[in-house]
Image (tube, rainbow, N blue to C red):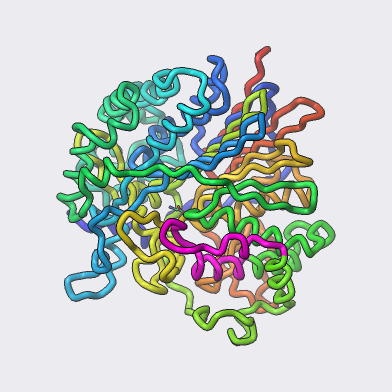
C-alpha cells in the first residue's frame, strides 16, 4: 500500500475572526446536545425527544458522529466517557485503544533499525485495538433508558440514507483524498475525487456493521466476520494485530479526577491514560494564584502567564504521563495545590525558554529542542456534551487520531481503523503527529494504552452541575478546554462566547506560542517583544463544545464552537 503521508501536510482551515457576541447560546429547558459533528447532535436530540435520557442521547450522538464525519472518529477507534448522574454518581469509562500483544521495541523501526515515524501513522502497524463500541455499550447498559437498537437507529439511518457533505467535511476529505487506499477511497470519494458540496455520503457496509452491533453488541467487534475483517486488513498492511487482541480488549472503569478552582468550582475530568484531566487541573491550580479577570481576557499579561503555565504542564506530561497500568503516574502530586504553588513561583515576566534550563529548576531531561518543521493534522477526534432535564451529564471525546486514522477501512465493514499507536512515544524525544514528545512512561509496550490528551470534563458550581465541556484536536484539547473554562469562570462569558473567543496554545515542545488570527497585531508584537516565538495558528485551536446550566432559571445553554461544523441542539418538551 502506498504510504500515507498526509500527517505531514497542512490542513487549511481558515481562522475565524473573534466571534464573541456574534451568536447567542442555544437554549433548551429539558435537555441539550452539543457536538463538533453537527448532524450527530441532531441524532442525540431525536433520542431525547423519544424519551431517552442524556446517556441514550450521548450514545446515539457518538455512533452518529462516526457516520457523519468518518474521518474524525468512529467504531474503529476509542474514546473516554465521563458521566455524572443527577444523584452525584460519577464514572470515567476508559475505552482507549490498546497496543496489540505482539508489538515490540522494533515495531516502529525501518529495516535498518532507524525510527520510522510513518509506521505509527499509516497502515497496519499504526492500528491499535479499538474499544469505542465496548465503552458505549457499557455506558448504555449501566445508565441508558431506551433499547440499544433504538439508540443505534439514527446512525444506521444516516448510513443508509446518506449524510450531506458540508464545507468542513469536503475540505477534510479533499485534503487527504489522494492518499486514501482503495477500500477507503471507494466509500469516501465520488468517482475517485473529493465529493462536491451537498453530495450524500452513503455507507452501506457501515450500515450492515451497525446492524450487527445493534443485534450482538460489542461481541460483533471481537469475534465473527467483522473481527476477522479487521485483523485481515491490518495484517495485510503490515500490522501484528490478532483475533486474540480483539477478544482480549479490556474496558476500564476509572475514578474521575476532581480538582477545585477558585473555591466554588469543582472540576471533574479524565484520569490517565489521558493526560487531559491531570494537566487541566494542574494549570488551573497554577492560575488560581493570579487575578485573570483583572488582567483582562486576551491581554498580553494573561496570555504570557497562561502560556507559561501550559509549558510547565506539558513538560510534566512528556516526562510523567502514561498508561497507569504500566507506569506510576504521580497524579496526586501533579494535581496538588502545593505543587501548583511551587510552579506559580517559577512564573516570571520572561518566557522560560529565554533562560537556561538549569534556571527553571526542572529535571535535566527537559532540554530545549528546535521547533519541528511539521504540522499536525488535527481533525481525527470529536467531542460531544449531553445533558437531560434531570441533570444527568455526559461528556465523550472519541478519536481515530488523525483524519481517517491509519487510512485503512476494514474490508467490507465500512470501519475506518485508527492510527492511535502514534500517540505512544515511539522513540524518545521523537515528535508524534501532534509534535508531542515523550519518554519511558509512554513507550510502546504490548497491551498498553497510548497516552491521550482527551479531556471530557464536567464542572460543578457550589456542588451542582454547571458545565459539560470538551474538545477535539490532540494536545490543543487541553488548552481549548482550559480557555473555555477560564472564559466562563474568570471572564463571565456565556457558553457561546466562551467557545468562540480566540485561543492560543503552547505545548512546551516545540517552543512555539501559537495564536489564532483574531488576536490583534499589537498583542502579537508585545508577546514577541517579551521573547515568545509567536506562530500563526493555521487550524484554529480545538473545537470546544460547552453546556451550561442555569439552575435558577431552569435553562440549559449550549455553545457550539464555530471552528468546526459543530451544533448545539436544545430540547424543550413543549416545542
Ligand atoms: N488521539 C489524540 C489523543 O488521544 O490525544
- Residue 22 appears in the rendering: no
Relative horizontal placement of residue 498, taking residue 251 as reference (left or right) = right
Relative horizontal placement of residue 561, taking residue 236 as reference (left or right) = right
Q: Where, by quadrant of the figure, is residue 204 drawn?
A: top left
Q: Position of residue 148 (x, y in %)?
A: 42, 22
Magenta stretch: includes residue 560: no
Q: Identify which residue is drawn at 57% across, 35% down.
A: 394
Identify the image quadrant of the N terminus. bottom left
Q: Identify which residue is drawn at 73% across, 77% down.
A: 348
Q: Where, by quadrant of the figure, is residue 199 drawn?
A: top left
Q: Position of residue 420 (x, y in %)?
A: 36, 53
Q: Position of residue 43 (x, y in %)?
A: 49, 25
Q: Position of residue 98 (x, y in %)?
A: 35, 51
Residue toward you, 320 or 170: 320
In the rendered image, the vertical position of residue 168 relative to residue 120, given as above or below: above
Q: What is the span of residues highlighted in magenta in the rendered image? A: 310-337
- Residue 465 appears in the rendering: yes
Amino acid at each position: 500500500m502506498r504510504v500515507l503521508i498526509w500527517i505531514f501536510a497542512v490542513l487549511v482551515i481558515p481562522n475565524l475572526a473573534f466571534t464573541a457576541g456574534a451568536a447567542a447560546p442555544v437554549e433548551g429547558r429539558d435537555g441539550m446536545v452539543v457536538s463538533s459533528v453537527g448532524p450527530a447532535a441532531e441524532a442525540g436530540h431525536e433520542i431525547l425527544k423519544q424519551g431517552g435520557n442524556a446517556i441514550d442521547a450521548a450514545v446515539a450522538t457518538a455512533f452518529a458522529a462516526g457516520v457523519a464525519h468518518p474521518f474524525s472518529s468512529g467504531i474503529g477507534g476509542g474514546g473516554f466517557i465521563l458521566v455524572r448522574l443527577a444523584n452525584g454518581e460519577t464514572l470515567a469509562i476508559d475505552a482507549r485503544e490498546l497496543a496489540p500483544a505482539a508489538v515490540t521495541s522494533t515495531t516502529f523501526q525501518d529495516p535498518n533499525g532507524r525510527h520510522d515515524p510513518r509506521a505509527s501513522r499509516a497502515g497496519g502497524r499504526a492500528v491499535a485495538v479499538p474499544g469505542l463500541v465496548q465503552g458505549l455499550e457499557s455506558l448504555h447498559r449501566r445508565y441508558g433508558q431506551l433499547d440499544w437498537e433504538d439508540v443505534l437507529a439514527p446512525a444506521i439511518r444516516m448510513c443508509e440514507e446518506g449524510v450531506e457533505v458540508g464545507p468542513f467535511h469536503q475540505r477534510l476529505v479533499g485534503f487527504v483524498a489522494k492518499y486514501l487506499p482503495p477500500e477507503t477511497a471507494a466509500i469516501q470519494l465520488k468517482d475517485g475525487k473529493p465529493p462536491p458540496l451537498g453530495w450524500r455520503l452513503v455507507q452501506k457496509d457501515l450500515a450492515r456493521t451497525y446492524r450487527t452491533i445493534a443485534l450482538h453488541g460489542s461481541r460483533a467487534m471481537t469475534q465473527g466476520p467483522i473481527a476477522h475483517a479487521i485483523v485481515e486488513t491490518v495484517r495485510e498492511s503490515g500490522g501484528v494485530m490478532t483475533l486474540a487482541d480483539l477478544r482480549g480488549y479490556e474496558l476500564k472503569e476509572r475514578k474521575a479526577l476532581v480538582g477545585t478552582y477558585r473555591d466554588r468550582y469543582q472540576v471533574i475530568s479524565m484520569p490517565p491514560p489521558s493526560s487531559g484531566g491531570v494537566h487541566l487541573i494542574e494549570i488551573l491550580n497554577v492560575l488560581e494564584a493570579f487575578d485573570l479577570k483583572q488582567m483582562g481576557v486576551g491581554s498580553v499579561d494573561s496570555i504570557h502567564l497562561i502560556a507559561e503555565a501550559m509549558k510547565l504542564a506539558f513538560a510534566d506530561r512528556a516526562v510523567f504521563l502514561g498508561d497507569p497500568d504500566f507506569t506510576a503516574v504521580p497524579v496526586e502530586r501533579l494535581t496538588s495545590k502545593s505543587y501548583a504553588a511551587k510552579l506559580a513561583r517559577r512564573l516570571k515576566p520572561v518566557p522560560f525558554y529565554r533562560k537556561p534550563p538549569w534556571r527553571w529548576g526542572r529535571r535535566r531531561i527537559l532540554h530545549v529542542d528546535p521547533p519541528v518543521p511539521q504540522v499536525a493534522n488535527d481533525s481525527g477526534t470529536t467531542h460531544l456534551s449531553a445533558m437531560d432535564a434531570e441533570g444527568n451529564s455526559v461528556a465523550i471525546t472519541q478519536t481515530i487520531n488523525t483524519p481517517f486514522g491509519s487510512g485503512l477501512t476494514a474490508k467490507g465493514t465500512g470501519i475506518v481503523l485508527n492510527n492511535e499507536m502514534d500517540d505512544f512515544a515511539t522513540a524518545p524525544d521523537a515528535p508524534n503527529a501532534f509534535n508531542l514528545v515523550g519518554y519511558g512512561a509512554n513507550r510502546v509496550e504490548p497491551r498498553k494504552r497510548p497516552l491521550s490528551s482527551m479531556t471530557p470534563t464536567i464542572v460543578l458550581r457550589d456542588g451542582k452541575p454547571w458545565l459539560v465541556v470538551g474538545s477535539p484536536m490532540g494536545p490543543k484539547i487541553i488548552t481549548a478546554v482550559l480557555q473555555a473554562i477560564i472564559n466562563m469562570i474568570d471572564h463571565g462569558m456565556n457558553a457561546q462566547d466562551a467557545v468562540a473567543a480566540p485561543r492560543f496554545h503552547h505545548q512546551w515542545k516545540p517552543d512555539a506560542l501559537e495564536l489564532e488570527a483574531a488576536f490583534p497585531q499589537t498583542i502579537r508584537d508585545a508577546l514577541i517583544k517579551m521573547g515568545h516565538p509567536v506562530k500563526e495558528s493555521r487550524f484554529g485551536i480545538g473545537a470546544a463544545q460547552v453546556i451550561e446550566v442555569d439552575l435558577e432559571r431552569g435553562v440549559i445553554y449550549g455553545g457550539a464552537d464555530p471552528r468546526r461544523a459543530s451544533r448545539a441542539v436544545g430540547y424543550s418538551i413543549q416545542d
